Image (spheres, rainbow, N blue to C red):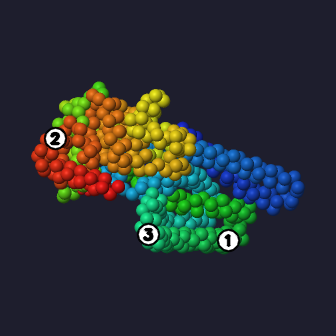
Amino acid sequence: MRNLLPLMPYLRRHRLLIGIGVLVAALSAGFSTIPPYLLGQAVEELNAGGVTTSLLLRYSGLILAAAVMDSIFKFGMRRLVGGSSYAIEYELRNDLFGQFLRLDQGFYGSNHTGDLMARMTNDLSAVRQLLGPGVTSIVSSGLTFLFVGVLMLRMDLQLGLLALILLPLISATFVILGERLRDRFRLVQDQFGHISTRAQENFSGIRTIKAYAQEEAELNVFGEANREYQKLNLSYVLLSALVWPLMTLLLTLTVALVLIVGGQAVATGRLSLGDFVRFNAYLGLLTWPMIALGWTVNLLQQGSASMARIAEVLHRPPTIATGREVQPRGKVVGAVEFRNVGVRYGDTWVLRNVSLLIPTGSTTAVVGATGAGKTTLTNLIARVQDPTEGQVLVDGLDVREWPLETLRSGIGYVPQDTFLFSVPLHENVTFGRPDADDAAVDEALLVSQLVNDVPQFPSGLRTMIGERGVTLSGGQKQRAAIARAVLREAAITVLDDAMSSVDTHTAAEILRNLRKVMQGRTSILIAQRIATVKDADQIVVLHNGAIVERGTHAELVQLNGRYAGMYKRELLQAELEETEQ
Ligand SMILES: Nc1ncnc2c1ncn2[C@@H]1O[C@H](COP(=O)(O)OP(=O)(O)OP(=O)(O)O)[C@@H](O)[C@H]1O
Ligand SMILES: [Mg+2]
């Protein structure tokens, strides 16, 4: 039950509607006890005075009226409590999604998409089931049991006790089996998460799969996971299939015993025939609530397990957030400094003792072999991750002392793996500045050299990108991402290998344009090509997580070290390509 505590604030917000719902449920339970009572009454009178049409009509009319009232209240109860449960599900889903957006890179590195999706879907729905059908059934079945129980005991203590001891067995069976059912249900959910992740990865990686002709292998892996899902589902269904026959059996047993004991009571005159009929009608009335109560325990267990999974995410503090003591700050100006920065994954340091000064308005290039730590280094500026040791400062202030939003809104970023949303190209470009006017968008497209490609797209800037639209080429995607960053007009712009898929000529053109628009602003360029970086104010060479060389292009060529070697190789390659042509 402790799992459900996080629901309290939500319940509190809807307490009025839920409260009225509970009241209506009580009324419904009260009205549901009237028809059996009237039935008994009718039998008494029939027994005493013979059958008259008016008597039959009167009783059936009254029974019908009570049933109508009961139905109206039941409807009201479902409407009120069910409505609140959907409202709470809505709020919970929004909160969960908001939390997903707050959580950092590290969280996504250690959790599978399918599993997160399962929390957003199946788990939320289990919690809603608990709040809707679960709550209505507890209240309405619980109250019915209470009312009818009292009536039965008052009618005949012996018979009443018999029924009230036997009937809860029905609920108990449900509860005992429910525990097992819940365990199996959890396995089913987990496996469903695996399957979703697998399928989703296949959809995203379809090109790789086809290129490597791995369809067969993937099908096998998927088939196996799917088979496991089927197996788990089967074991769940098998157990749940046992529940109903068992229930019917227990119920019939109760009816039979009541017939024996009650029949004798009627024979000895302890119980009137009317009361006996009434008692049996009450028994019938209790059947469903007894089943429902057991079933509700299941809903409670499933819902609380699901709530625990949701709370796990919901209450996880993001490792990267604005500190509590942080003061509001003006905009970022653009100076960056790394002070003895180190980043460690497990036992390996991927950056160590990195110190680097990037003055406002300068262009700094970072080069180095793949895996040297370039992306990791630039991730530290916008706090995509925090360093394990050392400090990163922006405008002389530790990035952890900045309000996260202010800091990030001062940084334009083109990531190494470009991501475009499945929305029109225009929206993709204006993602960081939705209110940008057409002139600004045109300018950004010009700088990023995407402008010449736009007319090729079926509806120009309005062309849908991605799943339901066109697929951009690698270079087009990168240039769209550059346009997005340019439009942001941030004080610091980081281009992480953002032109790797753009041809040398266009890349040079983009660089020229960028230099113009970035004047006075800080740029950090990560690149594999020396041609891209050679005009930078300073170039640093990263090797195995450490800065091994730094200086201008001329200085580094003079140094004749790693950088000079890269440069020579590039020149040689260009020469080779030329002679080949
Ligand atoms: N989440 C992570 N967990 C463990 N190791 C990581 C993680 N992220 C990065 N690394 C490791 O850190 C090292 C540096 O990675 P980084 O992405 O910074 O390299 P890079 O210089 O940008 O390489 P590239 O030129 O290929 O983009 C690599 O060895 C990488 O495997
Ligand atoms: Mg990288």
Q: Is residue 226 left or right of residue 140?
A: left
CB at disc 1 and ligand 1 closer than 8 Å? no
Q: Nearer the viewer, mark 3 or mark 2?
A: 2
The residue pinned by badge 1 equals 259
Q: Is residue 347 left or right of residue 494?
A: left
Judge depth for marks 1 and 3 and give the one in front. 3
Residue 70 x %, y %:
68, 49
Q: Which residue is mark 3?
A: 214
Q: Is mark 2 within 8 Å of ligand 1?
A: no
Relative image position of residue 401 (x, y in whole percent): 24, 34
Residue 322 percent location from the top left of the image? 29, 37
Left or right: 349 as drawn, with respect to 144: left
| Foreground pick, 527 / 94 | 527
Name the residue carrying label 2: 554
**Mark 2 residue type:** Ala
**Can you say which quadrant of the picture contains the N terminus?**
bottom left
Residue in the image at 47% along x and 72% along y: 216
Q: Position of residue 172 (x, y in %)?
A: 51, 66
Residue 526, by quadrant, is: top left
Q: Earlier in the sequence, mark 1 or mark 3?
A: 3
